[in-house]
Amino acid sequence: QEDLTNEVLGKISDKEDQKHKYTISKQNEIIASAKMEIDDLEDLFNIKLDRTSTSVTVGGFLTDELGDIPKAGDKLEKNNLLFYVLSADPNRVRRVYIRQLKPSKKRRSE
């Protein structure tokens, strides 16, 4: 599945640290670990998500928003972001493609 992702999205550069994990695919697009913190996602895209949950991670946010544990292929559009679940286990999300639909004027530099 990673080969398919690379073929569709092209070569991606890794940006990882202890707080969050994501790879930048193209401008305004990332592939994120479900463990990426929502605060880091908001900083990266210079947005504030409207959310009712207190989830800290992208995976938890998607689970709360969709009302169930997402499966690969599930999508969510929220606050000018498209979330597409790339991989998931029966109990949790693993990787998520995230694209900003209309880029904000300021995005944190990589």
Image (cartoon, rainbow, N blue to C red):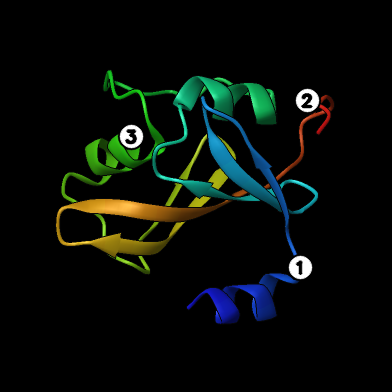
Q: Are marks 2 and 1 in contact (CB under 8 Å)?
A: no
Q: Which residue is mark 2?
A: 108
Which element type, helix, strand or loop, lies under badge 3? Answer: helix
Residue 81 vs 10, above or below: the answer is above
Mark 3–mark 2 CB contact (< 8 Å): no
Residue type indicated by callout 1: Lys
In the image: residue 49, left or right of residue 85: right
Q: Position of residue 70 (x, y in %)?
A: 26, 56
Image-based side of 82 in relation to 85, left or right: right
Q: Is residue 100 visible?
A: no
**Mark 1 secondary-structure assignment:** loop
Distance (Cα) linking label 2 and label 1: 21 Å
Q: Residue furthest front?
A: 18
Q: Which mark is residue 61?
A: 3
Residue 30, image x, y percentages: 64, 49
Check disc 1 and report the residue beneath it: 11
Q: Position of residue 14 (x, y in %)?
A: 69, 49
Q: Residues within 10 Å of mark 3 (few under 14, many from 20)?
A: some
Mark with earlier residue (3, 2) = 3
Q: Residue at x 59, y 44 (%)?
A: 22
Judge whether 33 appears above or below 49 on screen. Answer: below
Of the two numbered discs 3 and 1 on the same chain, state the one appearing first in sequence.
Answer: 1
